[in-house]
Image: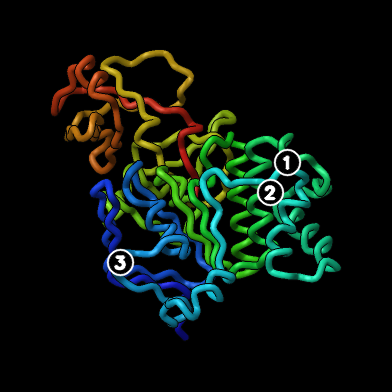
Amino acid sequence: MNNIILKAEKLRKRLDSGFSLEISNLCFKKGQIYGLVGPNGAGKTTLLNILSLLDRPSNGEIFFKNERISKPNLLTTRRKIHMITENPFLFSGTVFDNIVSGLRFRRISPKKWQGLVDKALEVVGLENFNHRNIRKLSVGESQRVALARAIVLNPEILFLDEPFVNLDRQSICLIEEYIRTIQKSNQTTIIFTTHDFYQAWHLSNQVISLVNGRIVEAPLDNFFAGSPEEENGSCFVRISKNIRIAISQKIDNRCNICVHPEGIVISKQEFDSSARNSFKGVIKSIHAEDGIVRVTIRIDPSIELTTLITVRSYRALKLAIDSEVFAVFKATSVIIF
């Protein structure tokens, strides 16, 4: 059975700035979560706008359930998908007013509005928010209202452009939880953009990496598998015979972990720090690009850590290949899968 719900072929979009998006082939399966990652200016939002039918490509075709999107079926297909922009616009008024706007546009019977709104608000953890003034909500609450406004229409594909920007850690965790709930409950295909590869890997069934308008193989820096350990009330994941990494929560089973390269500090000398992970190693490679220096440190014969530092830090530390350094990072910087 073919479960491809959305497919793009030979897409090309040239912008006035000279930027060009070129995607030869890209498929999305029903009921899966996809993370579209890349640096600022990579073309993530441009691609999302095209896939969500908000913008047209210069060349190429898009297929929804194996049917090519064209003018006759464009409106019908748009009704089956929904896009939440990076800064979703919410109308003045109440939460209820915002969520029913789509139902009103779709000419859904007003008799059904309350039940549908209550169900959507329950999914995003905002029960009893019907009559809240939209202007008095926090950033995280506003993002959840936008999510409720989308899912009340029961879209088959939900697009989210940078849904975690400007949110605190608690709000991010909640939004991630609701995204998974929507996927599992309705078999909704969810496609979101982010500049954070590790967040995408944590949440998605598949990560798609975009650089300069092209899909590239996504790097897996500081990605390890290991087994949990405990000692004196502290929790660890052992990733090799000699290396175990301190983590911030207890786990019971073998797992995968990631350490974000930007969360690792390099030091020439060991120093006192609240960070519970400190490993002595040898620099094996140094690569500079666009003002950022990527340094790879071997801390064990089979274990290397990659860190990203500024050119200024690199020069101040006077780093060189084969020099000894310490790689330091907090337990809270470790992402557990």
Residue type pointed to by label 3: Leu
Q: Is residue 95 left or right of residue 210?
A: right
Q: Element type at marker 3?
A: strand
What is the x, y in percent for residue 88? 58, 47
Q: Residue at x 25, y 31 (%)?
A: 292
Disc 2 crowd rating (10 Å Cα; few below 14, some 14-19, many 20+) is many
Q: Which residue is mark 2?
A: 145
Camera sees residue 259: yes
Q: Nearer the viewer, mark 1 or mark 2?
A: 1
User: What residue is pinned by disc 3?
Assistant: 11
The secondary element bearing badge 1 is classed as helix
Residue 230 drawn above or below residue 27: above
Q: Nearer the viewer, residue 328 or 135?
A: 135
| Residue under the image location 39 percent in, 64 percent down | 56
In the image, residue 268 sits, relative to residue 205, either above or below, namely above
Q: Label 1 is placed on what type of residue? A: Ile
| Residue 92 figure quarter | top right
Is residue 3 in sight in this rendering? no
Taking depth in this image into account, of 142 and 217 the one nearest to the observer is: 142
Q: Earlier in the sequence, mark 1 or mark 2?
A: 1
On screen, residue 132 versus residue 277, left or right, reads right
Relative vertical location of residue 35 with respect to residue 7 in this rendering, above or below: above
101 vs 203, left or right, is: right
Up/down of 70 relative to 103, above or below: below
Q: Residue at x 58, y 67 (%)?
A: 188
CA separation, marks 2 and 3?
33 Å
Q: Residue 214 at what x, y percent from top left?
A: 26, 56
Q: Are marks 1 and 3 in contact (CB under 8 Å)?
A: no
- Real-space Cα separation, disc 1 to disc 3, in angstroms: 38 Å
- The residue to which callout 1 is attached is 134
Amino acid type shown at disc 2: Val
Q: Residues within 10 Å of mark 3 (few under 14, many from 20)?
A: many
